[in-house]
Image (cartoon, rainbow, N blue to C red):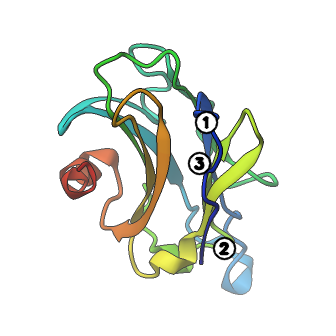
């Protein structure tokens, strides 16, 4: 299920977070643990259609310092958000036109096998949750394109995408993002 909240008003976006959460795997038959689920949040920046930079579990901060991954969870332990990416749009390099938010399952489970998985994007200035997606909506896929921040002129805006993809790592996701950049 996707819930999108339209972003109205004259205020432009300046500080945004993308959050990801899920529940740890419960013990299986005979008390044996199932295989841990390791989901990954990523924010990829583009200049036009050219991939420029990324913040994710293997590179926590973009080169310009504007996009910061606040820490990798490899099990989903803890309540609420397990991974958070903070984006300071005022610090992004002027060439960046799009920041794409994706989630991938590094351990290869399909999203319908993951307990209470969700991802969301929040305007940190107003506290408004602009979109929240239940990962089970991507059913048998291992990745999802959550949405994108774009700067067609001066001000940044957010657009929900919510499309499933096949990707366990951002390397597999990047070629699938071209169609969402226009």
Query: What's the distance in space between the residues labelled 3 and 1, CA to CA?
Result: 23 Å
Rendering quarter of residue 27: bottom right
Question: What residue does disc 3 label?
Answer: 74
Q: Residue at the location (38% across, 74% down)?
A: 141
In the picture provided, is 42 more to the left or to the right than 71?
Answer: left
Question: What residue does disc 2 label?
Answer: 115
- The crowding category of the residue bearing disc 3, from other C-alpha atoms within 10 Å (few below 14, some 14 to 19, many at least 20), is some
Query: What's the distance in space between the residues labelled 2 and 1, CA to CA?
Result: 26 Å
- The crowding category of the residue bearing disc 2, from other C-alpha atoms within 10 Å (few below 14, some 14 to 19, many at least 20), is some
Q: In the structure shown, which secondary structural element does the residue marked by tag 2 occupy?
A: loop
Which-is-in-front pick, marks 3 and 1? 1
In the picture provided, is 130 more to the left or to the right than 90?
Answer: right
Residue 43, position as x, y percentages in the image: 44, 39
Residue 102 in sight here: no
Residue 50, position as x, y percentages in the image: 17, 34
Q: In the structure shown, which secondary structural element does the residue marked by tag 1 occupy?
A: strand
Residue 90, position as x, y percentages in the image: 53, 18
Q: In the structure shown, which secondary structural element does the residue marked by tag 3 occupy?
A: loop
Instruction: Report the number of numbered marks.
Output: 3
Which is more toward the observer, 156 or 133? Answer: 156
The answer to the question of whether label 2 and label 1 lie on touching residues, with beta carbons closer than 8 A, is no
In the picture provided, is 172 more to the left or to the right than 152?
Answer: left
Task: First in sequence, mark 2 or 3: give its number.
Answer: 3
Residue 128 in sight here: yes
Which is more toward the observer, 16 or 111? Answer: 16
Task: First in sequence, mark 2 or 1: give its number.
Answer: 1
Which is more toward the observer, 9 or 71? Answer: 9
The disc placed on residue 67 is none
Question: What residue does disc 1 label?
Answer: 16
Q: Residue at the location (52% across, 79% down)?
A: 137
Rendering quarter of residue 49: top left
């Amino acid at each position: 299920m996707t819930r999108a909240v339209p972003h109205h008003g004259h205020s432009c976006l300046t500080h945004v977070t993308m959050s990801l959460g899920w529940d740890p795997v419960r013990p299986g038959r005979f008390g044996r643990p199932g295989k841990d689920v390791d989901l990954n949040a990523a924010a990829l920046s583009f200049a036009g259609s050219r991939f420029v930079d990324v913040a994710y579990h293997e590179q926590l901060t973009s080169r310009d310092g504007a996009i910061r991954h606040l820490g990798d969870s490899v099990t989903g332990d803890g309540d609420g958000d397990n991974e958070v990416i903070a984006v300071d749009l005022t610090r992004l390099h002027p060439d960046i036109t799009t920041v794409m938010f994706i989630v991938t399952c590094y351990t290869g489970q399909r999203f319908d096998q993951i307990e209470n998985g969700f991802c969301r994007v929040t305007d940190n200035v107003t506290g408004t949750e602009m979109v929240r997606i239940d990962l089970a909506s991507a059913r048998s896929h291992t990745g999802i394109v959550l949405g994108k921040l774009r700067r067609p002129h001066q001000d940044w805006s957010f657009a929900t995408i919510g499309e499933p993809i096949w990707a366990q790592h951002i390397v597999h996701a990047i070629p699938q993002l071209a169609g969402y950049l226009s």
